[in-house]
């Protein structure tokens, strides 16, 4: 068995070719590498978000519930994490966006501004002088 490596600098990919003793092709695998994360093989989605790196992808395909990501819901409209693909609009952060909206706002939503309420509390002047707040 002969193992042959081919590294392509333009595509940042690695091709592993396994040959038998008679130089006939036994197996051929191609891996896409991310130059910023050495030693990590990127798993690119092939089901609905083609070309996007996905946590649920492996050799056998998408391992998420149902074998594919779910489309966005109406609360997601206007978010910067939504991308449009030929099969529809999908969130690039979560495979099922409806779950993130069940108990209130999505924690990754970029189109929602959370207003913080500042209250005027009375501060003990003795403690404030010790802290250096005047």
Image: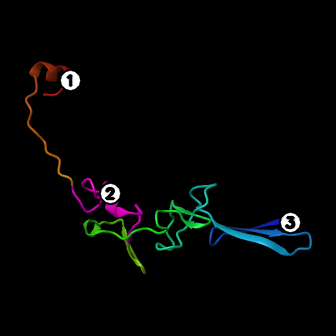
Magenta part of the chain: 90-113
Name the residue located 17 percent from the left edge and 51 percent from the top edge. Answer: 115
Name, please, the residue furthest toward the bottom: 86
Q: Position of residue 31 (x, y in %)?
A: 65, 66
Q: Position of residue 126 (x, y in %)?
A: 12, 18
Q: State yes or no: discs 2 and 3 in contact (Cβ < 8 Å).
A: no
| First-in-chain label (2 vs 3) | 3
Snapshot quadrant of residue 75: bottom left
Snapshot quadrant of residue 25: bottom right
Q: Position of residue 74 (x, y in %)?
A: 26, 69
Q: Give how far apart the Cα atoms at labels 2 and 1 are.
A: 41 Å
| First-in-chain label (2 vs 1) | 2
In this view, the residue in front, 51 or 87, is 87
**Viewport quadrant of the C terminus:** top left
Tell me the residue that label 3 is attached to.
2
User: In this rendering, would 1 be left or right of 40?
Assistant: right
Circle 3: element type: strand
Name the residue located 15 percent from the left edge and 24 percent from the top edge. Answer: 128
Which mark, by number, is residue 131?
1
Protein image colouring: rainbow
Tell me the residue that label 2 is attached to.
100
10 Å crowding of disc 2: few (<14), some (14-19), many (20+): some
Tell me if residue 76 is in the magenta stretch.
no
10 Å crowding of disc 3: few (<14), some (14-19), many (20+): few
User: In this rendering, would 55 be left or right of 12?
Assistant: left
**Viewport quadrant of the N terminus:** bottom right
In this view, the residue in front, 32 or 94, is 94
């Amino acid at each position: 068995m002969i193992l042959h490596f081919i590294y392509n600098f333009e595509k940042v990919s690695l091709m592993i070719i396994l040959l038998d003793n008679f130089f006939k092709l036994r197996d051929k695998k191609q891996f896409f590498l991310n130059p910023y994360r050495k030693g990590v093989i990127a798993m690119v989605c092939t089901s609905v978000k083609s070309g996007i790196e996905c946590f649920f992808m492996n050799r056998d395909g998408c391992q998420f519930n149902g074998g594919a990501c779910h489309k966005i819901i109406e609360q997601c409209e206007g978010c910067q994490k939504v991308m449009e693909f030929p099969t529809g609009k999908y969130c690039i952060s979560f495979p099922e966006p409806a779950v993130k909206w069940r108990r209130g706002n999505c924690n990754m939503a970029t189109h929602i501004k959370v207003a913080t309420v500042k209250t005027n509390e009375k501060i003990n002047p003795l403690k404030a002088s010790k802290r250096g707040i005047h």
